[in-house]
Each structure stands twice: as C-alpha cells, then as structure tokens.
C-alpha cells in the first residue's frame, strides 16, 4: 500500500479494474511503475479489486499501489467508476484506465498522455486498429467493435475505430461526467456516447496491444450477439436520457 502525496506536478491516477487477475496483476503493476519514469506527472496506481474469488486481493495488498477492495462484485463499469470517484475525491487531474489482464503494454502509456495534453482532448482512447499492429482481438470481438463503430457514427457522428478498448485516459471534465454516471457491464462503447453528448473531445491514438496474460474474456462467439444486442439498448437509452 502507498499513500497519496502532495506534489507540484499534475496528478494522474492509473485505475486498474481487476476481477480474478491473480496470474497477471502483479506484472501489470510492476510494468506500469517502470513506464512511469517517462511521465512528468505525479502518478499513483489504483487497483480496484471487484470482489475477486482468487488471490487478487492478497496480491494487490502487497503491491506498490492503492488497493480498493470492493465488498460485492459491481462489474467492470462499477469498478472503473469506483476508481474515478476515488481520484476525483483526492484531487487528481487525470484518470487512466488500464486492464488488469496485461493486454495494455505499459510502455504505451506516454502516448495517451501526450495525445491528451498536446491535442487538447478530454478523452484519449488507445486503438489497436489504427496501425493494425500487435494483437488484433478475437474474431467475435472484432465483429462487435466494427458494429459499435457504425453505431457511434450514426448516433453521435463520431467514428471510433476501437470503441471497446479499455485503454483510455480522461481529464477532469470527463471525470466529472463519469463520477455522476458511468455504464456498468460493458461500459466502453456506451461511455463514448456519454462523453459525446456532453460535448467532450475524444481522440484516438495508435497503440500496440498484447493478448491477455491471464484470466478469461467475458465475450466469446456464443455471447457476442447477446453482447451487441444488450449494449445497443444501453447506448440507445443513454442517448435518450442525456439528450433530454
């Protein structure tokens, strides 16, 4: 465990939602610490353990991070929002989401920070499909990603190549939106609609991702159709709710 220190630098909270990530979470944390030497920010790693039933809790409690252990399983959206709320309450300037399964290489973190600061963006998403290098995800997931790309274009006029990417960075304006409301089960595509309705500037940056280093994906060929249907309804309801 570490304490949050005061610093003249702007503060970055790297939020890692974790559910049963005992095989990868320690390596993810260590890799991020190594990458933070290239970042001119006061950065803190915040791991939100979403009521894991493996050894995730024991591992993060002994790692160099802030460990937030949820008493009940909230899903990835609830875990991410927990981290965002913690960062908001502790006066952080930025929140970066990084998956706990090792798909998001730590050395790509400076790219997202540079894009947010230099392009005056409110939200920066790391996309594996701009340069099409590295792991390109499963066939089932790519179907959903392309589907949501067109849904986003139709509803809010934004074409996001990697709408399900959980590798993203937000500033205070986006944090304020997410603190009030954040999607629960599959939040990434829906959050794009949410940020767009609030007129936040969304930017994508090319990154090279890896295959997951541990755990099992919640989306496979069988569940992909249900996933697209359920998230489509959530996107529609979010748009109607906040557009009003």
Image: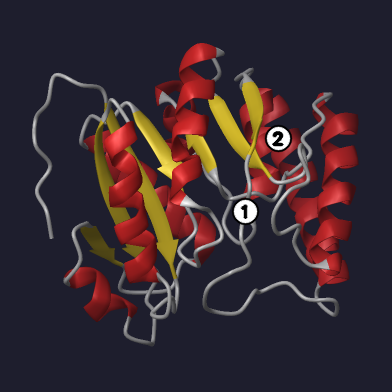
Q: Which mark is residue 209?
A: 1
Element type at mark 1: loop
Q: Is residue 113 left or right of residue 166?
A: left
Q: Is residue 56 left or right of residue 3?
A: right
Q: Which mark is residue 224?
A: none
Q: Could you give the CA–CA distance between mark 1 and mark 2, rounded to whole angstroms?
A: 24 Å
157 in relation to 211, above or below: above
Q: Which mark is residue 193?
A: 2
What's the colour scheme? secondary structure
Q: Is residue 170 visible?
A: no
In the image, 12 versus 190, the foreground residue is 12
* Image x and y of residue 141, in percent: 79, 63
Which of labels 1 and 2 is toward the front? 1
Q: Is residue 234 visible?
A: yes
Q: Is residue 128 left or right of residue 57?
A: right
In the image, 29 versus 6, the foreground residue is 29
- Tell me what residue is drawn at x 66 percent, y 74 percent: 218
Split into 4 quadrants, where in the image is the N terminus? bottom left
* Image x and y of residue 11, in percent: 26, 29
Q: Furthest-bottom residue in view?
A: 54
Element type at mark 2: helix
In terms of sequence position, does the residue under pointer 1 or pointer 2 come before the other? 2
* Image x and y of residue 93, in percent: 32, 26
In the image, 45 versus 108, the foreground residue is 108
39 in relation to 122, above or below: below
- Tell me what residue is drawn at x 20 percent, y 36 percent: 90
């Amino acid at each position: 465990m570490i304490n949050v220190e005061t610093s003249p630098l702007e503060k970055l909270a790297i939020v890692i939602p974790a559910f049963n990530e005992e095989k990868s979470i320690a390596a993810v944390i260590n890799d991020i610490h190594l990458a933070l030497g290239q970042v001119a920010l006061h950065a803190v790693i915040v791991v939100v353990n979403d009521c894991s039933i493996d050894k995730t809790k024991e591992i993060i409690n002994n790692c160099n991070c802030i460990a937030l252990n949820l008493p009940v399983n909230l899903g990835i959206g609830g875990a991410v929002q927990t981290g965002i709320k913690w960062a908001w309450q502790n006066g952080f300037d930025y929140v970066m989401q990084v998956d706990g399964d090792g798909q998001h290489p730590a050395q790509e973190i400076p790219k997202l920070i540079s894009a947010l600061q230099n392009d005056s963006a409110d939200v920066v998403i790391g996309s594996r499909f701009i340069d099409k290098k590295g792991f390109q995800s499963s066939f089932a997931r790519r179907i959903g990603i392309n589907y949501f790309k067109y849904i986003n274009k139709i509803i809010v006029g934004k074409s996001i190549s990697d709408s399900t990417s959980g590798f993203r960075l937000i500033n205070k304006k986006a944090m304020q939106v997410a603190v009030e409301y954040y999607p629960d089960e599959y939040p990434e595509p829906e959050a794009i609609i949410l940020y767009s309705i609030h007129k936040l500037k969304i930017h994508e940056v090319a990154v090279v991702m890896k295959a997951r280093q541990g755990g099992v994906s919640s989306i496979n060929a069988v569940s992909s159709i249900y996933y697209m249907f359920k998230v489509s309804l959530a996107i529609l309801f979010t748009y109607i709710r906040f557009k009003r």
